[in-house]
Image (cartoon, rainbow, N blue to C red):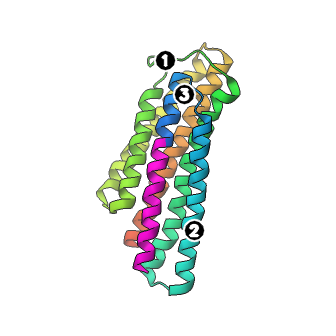
Amino acid sequence: MDAGLTQIETLLLKMGKLAEDSIALTLNGFKELADVHIQIRAWSNTLLILSEEVEDKATELMALHQPMAGDLRSLKVYIKVAYDMERFGRYALDISDIIKRLGSWEPLTDSELSLNVMGEKVKEIVRLALKLVETREQPLIWKLSKVEREIDDLYIENFERLAESKADAKTIIAYLLTIRYLERIADHASYIAESITYAATGRRIVLR
């Protein structure tokens, strides 16, 4: 059982690094109006394969070893965390797909939209979620929750700015989709924190 749990944790850390790279690359691609879709698609597909591998391994351990309560919680949580990490890759893919579908647009400045700030906050919350998976350090949960609230505020602020923007339709669509995908990535980071708390303590919390 212990060896199996370690294998799953190693897979999750591998997924986390790949998810981080995907988010960083897709945000850079959006900023530079560069088509990074092929690379992001490859990484997203890899994340999906790894997520299925985690699920298969966890299911096998539950079937063969009849784990006690603590280990059973961890196995259930790891399946969910793998799904959340797979969603990181999927939303990164969705962002990379925007330029592929729409072509180039007129970039908005930082004074017009706080996208760069929001992107950095999203990368931060993903790092915190991955650190929590690795260490289960409970104080990280509240730091993560604070960043998640900041991202929500930035999402609303940017949404309102776009509603009043005089930019062309293509620009507004590109930025509106991107801030929505970033907000969803932050939500899944919060789901990971909630799941890890349950695995570590048996308590269910809601951060959103």
- Disc 1 designates what residue? 112
Residue sitting nearer the eye, 1 or 75: 1
- Disc 2 designates what residue? 55
Looking at marks 2 and 1 on the same chain, the residue that comes earlier in the sequence is marked by: 2
- The magenta stretch spans which residues? 1-21
Looking at marks 3 and 2 on the same chain, the residue that comes earlier in the sequence is marked by: 3
Say the numbered circle drawn on residue 30: 3
Query: Does the segment drawn in magenta span residue 173?
Result: no
Whether residue 208 is visible, yes or no, is no
Residue sitting nearer the eye, 109 or 66: 66
Total marks in image: 3
Quarter where residue 39 is shown = top right
Quarter where residue 41 is shown = top right
Which amino acid type is marked by label 2? Answer: Glu
> SS at mark 2?
helix
Instruction: Pinpoint residue 26: horizontal percent, then vertical percent.
Output: 53, 35
Residue sitting nearer the eye, 203 or 63: 63
Instruction: Pinpoint residue 166: horizontal percent, then vertical percent.
Output: 60, 12
Query: Does the segment drawn in magenta span residue 11?
Result: yes
- What's the residue at 63%, 27% (across, down)? 99
Give the spatial CA distance, label 1 vs label 3.
Answer: 16 Å
Q: Main secondary structure of the magenta part?
A: helix
Say which of marks 2 and 1 sits in front.
Answer: 2
